[in-house]
Image: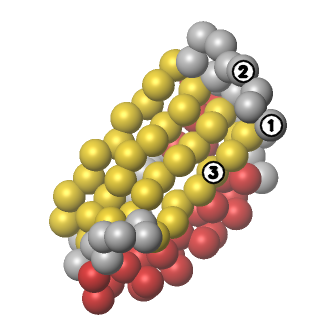
Amino acid sequence: MVIVTGWLRVAAEDRERYLETCRPVVDLARSTPGCLDFCIGPDLIDDERINIFEQWESLAAVETFRGEGSSDDQQELIIDAHVEQHEVAGTVGLT
């Protein structure tokens, strides 16, 4: 399993616009074979932060989806980012 976690920073006044441009990306990801979860959402405390969480069955699945990355319109709004990809050896359900 592959987990992608992190955050993006955009100007507070651009956050809602940025998130709206992500709707098609989230829809596409969630319908992609191998996607277990995909979430992009506003941080509850920091008005400039957007949190990223992705869960994929395999590295091949995430690489197939990832393709070219953010569109130019999205990329120009991003001030800073920190995103990491994790390969998970095992999982224990908590619910």
Residue 44 horizontal/vertical position (percent): 43, 70
Q: Residue at x 64, y 22 (%)?
A: 1
Residue 25 horizontal/vertical position (percent): 59, 62
Q: What residue is disc 3 on?
A: 38
Residue 14 horizontal/vertical position (percent): 32, 84
Cβ atoms at labels 2 and 1 below 8 Å apart: no
Q: Residue furthest left?
A: 79
Mark 1 or mark 3, which is nearer to you? 1
Q: What residue is disc 1 on?
A: 95
Q: Horizontally, is 37 left or right of 89 in the view?
A: right
Q: Residue at x 35, y 53 (%)?
A: 7
Residue 29 at least partly seen: yes
* Quarter-of-image position of residue 36: top right
Q: Which mark is residue 92?
A: 2
Q: Amino acid at mark 2?
A: Val
The CA span between labels 2 and 1 is 9 Å
